[in-house]
Amino acid sequence: MVLSPVQKTLADSIIQEQLSRDMPSVFTRDGWSTSLTPVCAQQPCGEKLSLDGDWAVFRWPFPREEHYYASPDVFDLDWPRVRQPGKVFTQDPEKRPASVPGYDRVTLAHIDPDDGAMLRRTIDIPAAWEGKRIFINLDAVYPAARIYVNGKLLADHRSGLTPLIADITAYVGPGCPCVIGVRLLRRHPFVQLDMARHSAEFCGISQPACLFAVEKLHIEDYCLPTALDDALTTGTLAGTVTLRNDGAPASGTLTLTLTAPDGTLAGRTVCTFDAAVGRTEVGMSLSILAPLLWNDEHPHLYTAVLTLDAVGQKAEIMNFRVGFKKLVFRDSRAYLNGHPIKLRGVNHLTYHPQYGLYTPEAWLRKNLTLMKQANVNCIRTHYLGPRVLAELCDELGFYLIQELPIDWGTHFIHDPAWVGPALMRLQGGVLRDRNHVSVTVWAIGNENMSESLSVADMGRFHLMLYDRFVKVLDGEHPTMFPPPGPAGPNIRAILELSVGDIADTHYSFNAVKTFLKEGKSENPIAWTAEKEVTTREEALARGWSGTWFSSEYGLCSMNPDLLTAAKYTSVIDDEKTVYPDGTTPLKVFTDRLTREWGFMRSEPTCLGGAYFPWLSSGSSEGPGHPFSWTVLAEDNDWGVMTPELLPKPAYWALRNLFAPVWFPAEAEVFTGEDEVTFEVENQYNDVNLADCTLRFTIGNGTRDWFDVHPDIAPGQAGTVRFPVWSEKAREALAEGTSQMLRVFLIDPTGFVATSKDLTVYTKGRTRAEAYEFDVGPQPEYVDRKDQ
């Protein structure tokens, strides 16, 4: 699927209009029309004043007009107080959704469109901010809000996951009090874009908020992606810095300094500029030799500092962290920093059991630490995650597949009226996170397929428009478009090959397996199930990378209290296994994950997958312990964690199966040999197994062990060999009694990534006899006792 010349012209005109306007506008051409909302590119910097804390709240219905409650003249000391960021509204956990007339968790149609509240906070603007430009930053207000400053309407922000940043200089006076009013809207026409179905009806300021002040001549934005040469020996930080000048024309210097992880100076460059009134773009480039590379195992971060010096004003300093990584696709396989890469991902619904969409950094850090301990190295956000999530992924080492919010567009993906709101979300998300080294893929929307063939062409045009727009904003990161999963007998599976750099599939691997076998894929065009065939050659010709990912798979109902409810466990499974009564859900989960992840980890063209989900969102008014009654947003206790971050039994199975090395269940000792040998594949990205320890113990004990350090490079397979060091074990094997060994995979930091029981046995035959029915060259045993 490619854009026609006419479609390219229309798409580029829409994109140009979105990027060039400072005020809302309506774009109309040839019967196609949408309302565009500009996105302020200003980065929060300079002197900051937090707006977090207690806010006064007046809940709808309002006896008077809305603007009255935002006025500075209104007395609000008798209003109730609510802590923000945090929830002001949420789904009532004691009210059955089935009892609510017109209940619709997807569109929130059961909520009155005027429902919500007015939040107010009075804050003194520092007198020292005289002569500066003053901005407000609301990192997210969910699902929407109208913002007032000193009683005047500033913005109508109908996006619940992307930031609102606006210049309020004309609305405030330095040295004077300022009243910020946030008119929360619990529902709006485009709420479905922001995946309201997972929000549990959350409403409130969901991320930190602040005021900040900058000089009239200041850094507005920067796009400074890192790059590596093919030899991975030279790292470059290069791009543009956008200056905004709201004063007289001025000249000055921009200095870019790079500090290595150990605190030493890595590089420095200085550029001069002449800034007219308005925006000026300054190109900058800084190269360093032998940079430390960033990946999930070694997330080396450099500190970049931009310093703006101009006559007559204080120097402006902006700090941010960068890393050097190189992701390439070659021969239908993904390589990171020169080695094969496999993403062991989970879907992360950023949702706190008590605070809702506000996820404090400490809680989020604990969450990601538990992921690390489960061998997870990739996060797919199932709606745009908060700003701090990308920062933590940089620091802790996670490949971030950041989902940009366009959800379940069956009834609107073809409608031009929804394009403007979608573009606003794409722009807000990309501008916020594009400089983060952890961002690996932009996942544009989720499960968007047109409702019928009659509107399918327009729906697909919009998807291609979104892909084009994201690449204008950030040409460094690949894109993918997560498709719907199986839906009835006519839509068994979809492999999205028609748009995006990486193909994607949900919940079924039938389409992938057919494609790998036949070199073509038959996919539905719309929910009415009309099909089209895409060949491998056609997909490659339009720009497909040759790799694929499964951004949702698994889906098991995992209530940890239900120990024998196997028949309720597995959902949307290619293989409907019937288990006997009394089977544990853990076995069902383990069998399915072994089968599905086992296929992905062994298939070279697969970039990886993201198990769905890590935890489920839900509304709880309990005391915050793990056993509070919770109304789950999607009505199922999916996930391997409880919302309170207690690992369920499935957590341990996922940890075991996500280990970078899988060990066999058994190994044979052949006649004439005194070593155990077996093959493994090293799926670390840059750790050689020679730097790890494979520690073998006898049985359950830890009193006697034997260490092995096999020289197996990242992304390669090789042989593990070690002697049967225990005399008793050798005697037992000689008598025909198998022995159970346990192997521990210990990485260079001392972290035990997994352990596995290994049955060692003998059948009294030679290696040649064991392989006598094989075709082709036989494995050759080399006696290494003396090496």
Image (tube, rainbow, N blue to C red):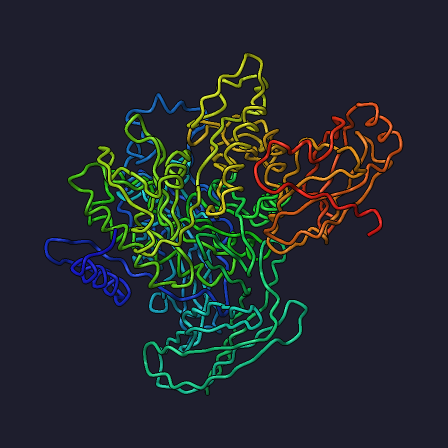
Residue 117 visible here: no
Indicate the position of residue 93 as horizontal and vertical percent values.
Answer: 46, 27
Q: Could you say which is closer to the camera, residue 578 or residue 146? A: 578
Report x, y in % for residue 453. Answer: 18, 38
Name the one closer to the observer, 347 or 86: 347
**Quick check: 529 above or below 586?**
below
Q: Quadrant of residue 179?
A: bottom left
Residue reaching furthest to the top: 581
Residue situated furthest left in the rendering? 30
Coordinates of residue 137 in the picture (x, y in percent)? 42, 59
Q: Residue at x 47, y 31 (%)?
A: 555
Q: Left or right: where does residue 702 sit relative to residue 467?
A: right
Residue 547 lies, in percent from the top left, at 42, 49
* Looking at the image, residue 252 lies above or below residue 239: below
- Which residue occupies the extreme right position in the image? 727
Residue at image position (45%, 25%) is: 575
Q: Residue placed at 53% from the left, 62% from the top?
A: 325
Q: Give the left or right position of residue 368, taking residue 115 as reference.
A: right
In this rendered view, identify the residue nearer to me: 207 or 711.
Answer: 711
Note whether residue 620 is visible. Answer: yes
Residue located at (56% from left, 68% from top): 232
Q: How many marks?
A: 0
In which quarter of the view is residue 245 placed? bottom left
Is 263 rendered above or below residue 63? Answer: below
Judge from the rendering whether residue 756 lies leftward or rightward of residue 588; answer left or right. Answer: right
